[in-house]
Image (tube, grey):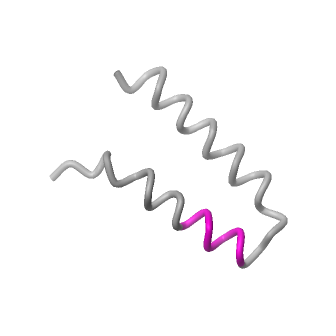
Amino acid sequence: MNLVPHIGPVAALVAGILILLMPKLLNYIVAIYLIIIGAVGLFGR
């Protein structure tokens, strides 16, 4: 079973819940998400 296509929506859901619970985490969550998406885009070919 390939779980790679499901990472984006699950990450968005978790990030949304964390932002609702702790709004100060928004900057860190966005930064980490962008770093992960960038790394997957560069090295995940």
Does residue 28 appear left or right of residue 18 in this picture?
A: right
Does residue 23 appear left or right of residue 42 in this picture?
A: right
Is residue 9 depicted above or below 13 in this figure? above
At 76% from the left and 59% from the top, the residue drawn is: 26
Does the magenta portion include 25?
no
Placement of the C terminus among the 4 image quadrants: top left
At 77% from the left and 73% from the top, the residue drawn is: 22
Does residue 18 appear left or right of residue 36 in this picture?
A: right
Does residue 9 appear left or right of residue 34 in this picture?
A: left
Is residue 16 depicted above or below 1 in this figure? below
At 50% from the left and 57% from the top, the residue drawn is: 11
**Residue 23 picture location, percent across and down:** 80, 69
Q: How many marks?
A: 0
Q: Most extreme residue toward the left, as rendered?
A: 1
Q: Which range of residues does the magenta coloring cover?
A: 14-20
**Residue 40 picture location, percent across and down:** 46, 31
At 79% from the left and 52% from the top, the residue drawn is: 27
Q: Main secondary structure of the magenta part?
A: helix
Q: Quadrant of residue 29?
A: bottom right
Q: Most extreme residue toward the bottom, as rendered?
A: 21
**Residue 35 picture location, percent across and down:** 62, 36
Is residue 30 depicted above or below 18 in this figure? above
